[in-house]
Image (cartoon, rainbow, N blue to C red):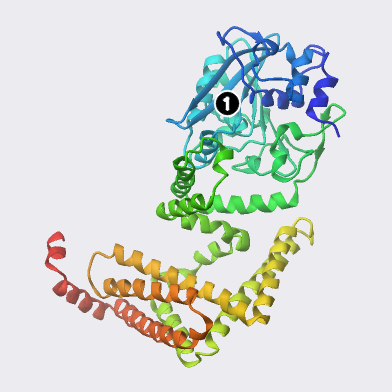
Amino acid sequence: MSSLTEYIRWYADFSFYDKPFNEIDNLILSTLTYYHYEMKDSSRPLSLRRCVTDSVENDSFLSAVYHSRRFGTLMISDFTEIFSRDTGTQFAAMKFHLYDQVYYIAFRGTDNSLVGWKEDFVMSYRITEAQHSAVKYLERVIEDDKEYLVGGHSKGGNLALYGACYISEQKRSRIKHIYNNDGPGLCPEVSDVTLVDQVKDRMTVILPRYCIFGKIFAHDIPDTRIVTSSYSHINEHDLVSWEVNCGALNTVDEFDPSSEWINSVAEKWIKDVSPPEREKLVSSVFATAEARGATTYTEAMQLDVDGVEDLIKNVVESDSLRAVAKIPEKALFGDFIERLKSGKLARFINANQLIEGITFTVLGLLMAIFTDNAFHIIITVLLGAIVLFQLVYTIKKLKQSRWNFSKERTRVYIFLVIAVLFIIILVKSQAMFIVGSAIAGGWLLVVAYMSFLAFRQRKQRDFAYWKNFAKSILYTGCGVFIILAPAETLQWFMLVLGGLMVIDGISAIIYSVIEANDKYSEKYNNLKEKVKPKRFRDEK
């Protein structure tokens, strides 16, 4: 296969009058937005050779462009570049003069700046300054007596689409075609996606075979092409790697199966995480890099131990753990957990503490009575249930794909890894204790944290208030202990924890019965009013 650079050399001597503009030319002009240009009067057209400021010596792509008649002599005007850390804006656009009264407007995608990368994620929860700038730019440069093609790569493709959708109807009528080259679509929570229907019939979407970015908020566009790349995996996003065959894009019919799996996980994650939750997570992650003085994406990726610690701290403090936890949940279980949560059983469990009380009581009795074996039995059953579920889920997906193991290979790999780990844990007792301790300790710390939140949110100092306070302290201690303690202490620890869980479970059962019974609930509420501290009664 041939590259874009070779295409430029083939067409070097042909102007756009000789060989009409095509989708490959669109890719080349979109790539040219990533370079820098010097134009004292941006409204006055200059040839690319006269205004490009980047060195052409060590850049084969730019060198081919520079020395070709087709692109080197192409006239450029209205080059606009905006970069602001204060407003979080990274934007650039330019207008190429193709031939009489026909122009191509190209928007730059994300550069290496941290501001640009953050703006990409901001698109998932609000309209960005770059999107506003795209609308203003099109309104300014589009003239009523000329025709325009609009496009861009990555974020630039999104800006081309957003700008075309949100400009005035008069200006939009002058746009004859839109090219979105592996750029995300419009976020449905913050944009009017029905506007896409007005332009989709004059739009082309070009995506690499291993596509991640272009599938985010994707729209149903009839003219969608899948192109091969000389790179692999996530690097296929690079336009320069896209392949050409005899002067046309080298296209295929299907995406890479592993990228489709990633897309399905990302789609379910975005669907399940609200825009405010996305904002908290994005702010916490980028705050870590900004606090450490990073100004580029490359610098932000160079995290040391302290940087990782700061990142975890910011994620926890921003209350973004739930959003992060959704990523492995969606990867392993898809939307099964969400369906379970929305079921009648889940609503009953959430509405009634009786189930929690019974569960804690039963587990506590098992631990207190069978101190030697209860831990191993519970952990084995739990891990076995995970392996069984993953097996059933994997078989279900394979059947849906008509046993296409290539398409579902990532899911099969996950199951095999989980199964092998389960076997190792069963065979090696020390491994069972280590993994079991981590699971049990983590679970106890989660219970402690949930109890602490319930304690903080409870305004009345009643039974539930003090119960959650005690649970947060006791279960924190138990969780830390089971994670750090040696195996020799397991027997008496299980006895103590079992007794604690029985007491907790029985109290939850009693409390749920009181709340469920109107007669006792009224007496209980009257009692709470009598023993409530004076300051709480005054507030009411």
- Res. 396 image quadrant: bottom right
Quick check: can you spot residue 16?
Answer: no
The residue lying at 12 percent from left, 61 percent from top is: 538
State the image coordinates of residue 501 (x, y, percent, origin top left). 40, 82
347 up-or-down from 77: above or below = below
**Amino acid bearing label 1:** Ala
Residue identifier under label 1: 164
State the image coordinates of residue 236 (x, y, percent, origin top left). 72, 40
The residue lying at 18 percent from left, 77 percent from top is: 527
In the rendered structure, the answer to whether residue 67 lies left or right of residue 168 reads: right
Which of 253 and 123 lies nearest the eye of the viewer?
Answer: 123
Quick check: can you spot residue 387?
Answer: yes
Binning the other alpha carbons within 10 Å of mark 1 as few (below 14), some (14 to 19) or many (20 upward) gives many
The residue lying at 75 percent from left, 26 percent from top is: 23
State the image coordinates of residue 138 (x, y, percent, origin top left). 55, 20
For label 1, the SS is: helix
State the image coordinates of residue 196 (x, y, percent, origin top left). 59, 33
Count of numbered circles on the image: 1
The outermost residue toward the bottom is 369
Which of 152 and 345 lies nearest the eye of the viewer?
Answer: 152
Which of 184 and 109 lies nearest the eye of the viewer?
Answer: 109
In the rendered structure, the answer to whether residue 237 lies left or right of residue 289 reads: right
The residue lying at 41 percent from left, 51 percent from top is: 318
Q: Quadrant of the C terminus?
A: bottom left
Q: Quadrant of the N terminus?
A: top right
The outermost residue toward the right is 246
